[in-house]
Image (cartoon, helix red, strand yellow):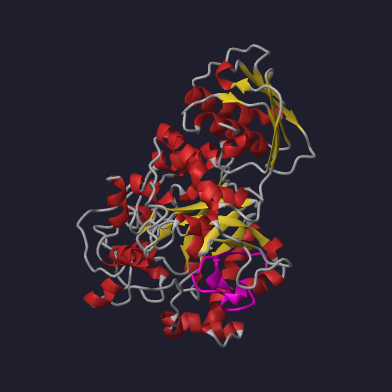
Amino acid sequence: MKPDRIIPMPNEVRYKGKGFDLAGLKNITGDERFASAMNVAKEQLEKDLGVRLGGASEDAIAFEYDSDIPAEGYEIEITDKGIEIEASDNSGALYAVQTLRMAAMAGTKARDTYLPGAEIEDSPRFGWRGVNIDEARHFFGEREIKKIIDLMCLHKLNVLHWHLSDDQGWRIEIKKYPRLTEIGSKRDKSQINGWRNTEENNVPVSGFYTQEQIKDIVAYALERGVNIVPEIDMPAHLAAAMAAYPWLGCRELDRPVAWYFGSSIPYSLGIRDFNRSACVGSPRTMQFIKDVIDEVVELFPFGYFHIGGDEVPMEEWKKCPKCKEMMRKQGFTDYKQLHTWFINEVGKYAASKGRRLIGWNEILHGGNLDNEVLVQYWTPQPDGRVAKHLDKGGKVIISKHKHFYFDMPFSQYPLKNTYKFSPYFGGINRQNVSGVVGVEGELWAEWIDTPQKLEFQMNPRLAALSEVGWNKTEKKNYKEFVARLHEYFPMLDALGVYYAKEPTFTASKNPFKRAKTVNAWYSKDMNVEYDADRKL
């Protein structure tokens, strides 16, 4: 397939001269600074294209270093003699290989390994091109996470945001606090059939990653150009940790790991105290947080640490002697200020460990947020504080609900929503858009309980996200993109990746039919699209 038909589409392709058949590739050689990229290239091309590298000097892919090429960018020259790749870093060299790999694997004729003669110049639009995988709600395991990392590499996505704790589960071993996984990683059932439903099943959910498993996955990701950001939720979404250590809250209450996802169930069953925050006025709680950070940052070398910081209930703080004393000591008059103080304190500690804090955009609500904290903008409703944060020189990742919440039904957010994304909205303009560091797709797993459904919700949205994050063309042609998708799907089939088919991902043009599907998803059947798609 021609390289300008791949996803994400390269920024510049010029065709000239005779091409090269990757089936005849004999060698991969070049600058030792690209040793990791060359090793991954060898592994991928042998596995996916069946090439057998023998060591001959001709018919080779040759890597060369060029300091003038932008970060993560690359240049490729394809001739009948072989392929030359130039880059300034290992990621750029690796992404060049993904361009060749996809061009050879995709297309209506699978594995057409002949590449036409061409010169390609390419580099990303955004430095942060991420995917968030939620394993707190459902645990998918090492095999699926590595499969997702492989897909991210292929699509030139470079950040895996790994959601490892929430009310419904704690998924990472912390050696100083073993009860976090002994108790916090298990629940005996789950809410089912949608946000508005109060039904439950009796299927236990459990699982966590040991620190050794984490190290292995991090190393695997780094080889493929993917950095991993851990998210440990605080001060809210901490019910699993509180089930293990009740003293983390303002009151020591004996509560199990939460099995429900929405508030409809606790209200209907008369469950109280279901939505609580950590006691931020307690020195013991604050020490717990520092201890957890200490162990987590040793496992993840990337310079960021995500704490969520969203949807924080403050009712217990208003009654807690320790929190009220902290309010008095800091001179605060509003408990939103206490929330911001907590974020800033954790941010300072993370900074002492060489990590920059990230939180969802609710962390802006108390004012006076440290400008070094990276804000992730997700809320469906506009938040003018985000634009003000950018105006002050702050940095933002955009994960807007309408465009990038991949767990939602396609009938609510069709693929076109993702592909047609523009960063210019809600006060983000030409003057402050430089503070937008990138985009990220979110896969929350309340209603995703199997790896195959995870892949269904993710694909082909992942393809659209990759093009939004990489290609610099402002006005994108959705119709042309869908045409390329149909050439791209045979490659996903060959890789064993499940994806939503057409018409599922385009969604019905009939608004009443779409509304009916969305209502069913929310009220009685979270598999309504998934089950229908599997019959296509």
In the image, is residue 503 part of the stretch drawn in magenta? Answer: no
The answer to whether residue 319 of the structure is visible from this angle is yes
Residue at the right extreme, as displayed: 68
Residue 148, how many percent across, how many down?
46, 42
Instruction: Pinpoint residue 385: horizontal percent, then vertical percent.
Output: 61, 75
Point out the residue furthest to the bottom here: 333
Left or right: 486 in relation to 197 = right
Question: As displayed, is residue 459 above or below residue 332?
Answer: above
Q: Is residue 160 visible?
A: no
Number of numbered discs visible in the structure rendering: 0
Determine the residue positioned at 45% across, 72% down.
311
Residue lying furthest left in this view? Answer: 202
Q: Check the image and report above or below for 524 versus 177.
A: below
Residue at image coords 26%, 62%: 193
Residue 263 location in percent, x, y?
32, 73
Q: Residue at x 23, y 69 (%)?
A: 198
Q: Quadrant of the N terminus?
A: top right
User: Residue 170 location, x and y as percent?
Assistant: 39, 56
Q: Is residue 334 left or right of residue 273?
A: right
Name the one closer to the observer, 435 or 186: 435
Give the answer, above or below, for where 249 lies relative to 303.
below
Relative to 192, 237 lies left or right: right
Q: Nearer the viewer, residue 157 or 177?
A: 157
Part of the protein shown in magenta: 360-386
Query: Which residue corresponds to the image point at 54% horizontal and 47% vertical from the top-left?
Result: 480
Image quarter where the C terminus lies is: top left
